[in-house]
């Protein structure tokens, strides 16, 4: 898989660039057509180009509009040029795409050769977009590029906003909810990104995972050999070959993650805190000699520091921490350094969920 640095289990794609034919032909875990397609691969592999071309072709052939999802409103500036520049050079060199600000800049309308072809919208404007949902009733598909943030800079309550945006777009045509697939594209940044955690992907990933099916979604993890080779052969990247970002961009290695292991360290641990998740108390212990932090389901009820990250688990004697709390930030730091060990997958899920909030 992507975070195998030795690359023994990576699935190489035979084509020089990404091809989404396979994932688009697949059904979800219940045998239904998925509405979320999550695709990760190394940089410059062509996944954004593939799905961008698909959307433009469907508009040119059938008049089916599309929507581009961004995280923040300021990203909508020059959205047409950012989206269409490479597509124009490669496939549509006789066409021009432009955009116009709508509703005081809450969203932009896209035009291909002066014909309205879609919209660009931001997650951070999710609440304001509700009143304009009738305008998006002709959108047939959506692209959310870079859904994993390299800087861990996500919107406040991002998952709710993402769901709200899709709900606003999927209304109309006489239906309370239409089928509007979202192509979520990203380089591999972190297995504890909000989307992987919310969909239960984080704890299911294995070293040989290529496709992962869920209820309503499919995840594909690919590796484009030619893109990797081009990155490695770059003189600039050779100069910085010891930097982890180069491995992330040229290989398919998660930028912010080292794989945490399910094993118990030797010695005696020092109790740090109790974390409550889904009604269960988990003990967090530091093993100084081993240099690791261990999570299991043996909590010390007498220890004063008891924390939770959800309102469902919040009760007397527990401190509810906010997402940017310094203590959670410290735990994230140690997780990214590969310093965590877990009793089992349930304990791992509890930590991953807690760190993602």
Image (cartoon, rainbow, N blue to C red):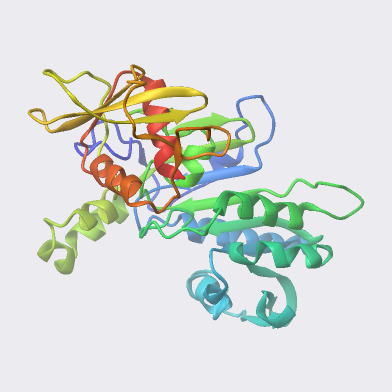
Single out the residue that lies furthest toward the left.
289
* Visible residue check, residue 324: yes
Residue 304 image-quadrant placement:
top left
* Visible residue check, residue 88: no
**Residue 289 sits above or below residue 159 on the image:** above
Single out the residue that lies furthest toward the right.
174
Query: How many numbered tags mark residues here?
Result: 0
Q: Which of 228 and 109 lies nearest the eye of the viewer?
A: 109
Residue appearing at x 43%, y 57% in the figure: 46
Q: Which of 250 and 101 lies nearest the eye of the viewer?
A: 101
Return the x and y of residue 247 as percentages of the image width and height: 22, 52
Residue appearing at x 68%, y 35% in the figure: 33
**Residue 197 sits above or below residue 146 on the image:** above
Residue appearing at x 11%, y 18% in the figure: 267
Quarter of the image where the N terminus is located: top left
Residue appearing at x 28%, y 22% in the figure: 262
Q: Which of 341 and 216 lies nearest the eye of the viewer?
A: 341
Return the x and y of residue 183 as percentages of the image width and height: 58, 51
Return the x and y of residue 157 as percentages of the image width and height: 56, 53
Return the x and y of residue 230 as percentages of the image width and height: 25, 59
**Residue 92 sits above or below residue 15 on the image:** below
Horizontal relation, residue 349 to residue 167: left or right: left
Horizontal relation, residue 290 to residue 280: left or right: left
């Amino acid at each position: 898989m992507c975070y195998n640095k030795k690359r023994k289990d990576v699935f190489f794609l035979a084509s020089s660039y990404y091809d989404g034919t396979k994932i688009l032909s697949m059904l979800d875990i219940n045998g239904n057509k998925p509405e979320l397609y999550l695709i990760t691969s190394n940089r410059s592999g062509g996944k954004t180009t593939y799905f961008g071309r698909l959307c433009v072709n469907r508009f040119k052939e059938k008049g089916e509009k599309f929507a581009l999802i961004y995280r923040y409103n300021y990203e909508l500036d020059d959205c047409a040029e950012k989206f269409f520049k490479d597509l124009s050079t490669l496939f549509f060199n006789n066409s021009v795409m432009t955009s116009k600000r709508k509703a005081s800049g809450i969203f932009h309308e896209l035009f291909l050769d002066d014909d309205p072809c879609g919209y660009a919208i931001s997650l951070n404007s999710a609440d304001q977009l509700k009143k304009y949902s009738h305008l998006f009733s002709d959108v047939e598909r959506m692209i959310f590029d870079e859904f994993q943030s390299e800087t861990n800079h996500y919107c406040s309550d991002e998952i709710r906003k993402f769901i709200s945006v899709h709900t606003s777009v999927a209304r109309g045509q006489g239906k309370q909810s239409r089928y509007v697939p979202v192509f979520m594209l990203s380089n591999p940044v972190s297995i504890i990104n909000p989307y992987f955690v919310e969909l239960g992907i984080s704890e299911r990933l294995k070293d040989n995972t290529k496709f992962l099916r869920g209820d309503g979604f499919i995840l594909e993890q690919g590796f484009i050999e030619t893109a990797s080779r081009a990155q490695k052969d770059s003189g600039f990247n050779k100069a910085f070959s010891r930097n982890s970002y180069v491995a992330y961009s040229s290989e398919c290695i998660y930028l912010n993650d080292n794989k945490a292991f399910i094993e118990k360290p030797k010695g005696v641990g020092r109790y740090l805190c109790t974390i409550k998740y889904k009604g269960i108390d988990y003990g967090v212990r530091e093993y100084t000699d081993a240099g690791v932090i261990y999570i299991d389901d043996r909590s010390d009820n007498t220890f004063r520091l008891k924390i939770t990250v959800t309102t469902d688990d919040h009760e007397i004697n527990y401190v509810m921490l906010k997402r940017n709390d310094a203590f959670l930030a410290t735990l994230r730091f140690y997780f990214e350094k590969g310093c965590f060990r877990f009793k089992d997958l349930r304990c791992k899920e509890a930590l991953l969920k807690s760190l993602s909030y």
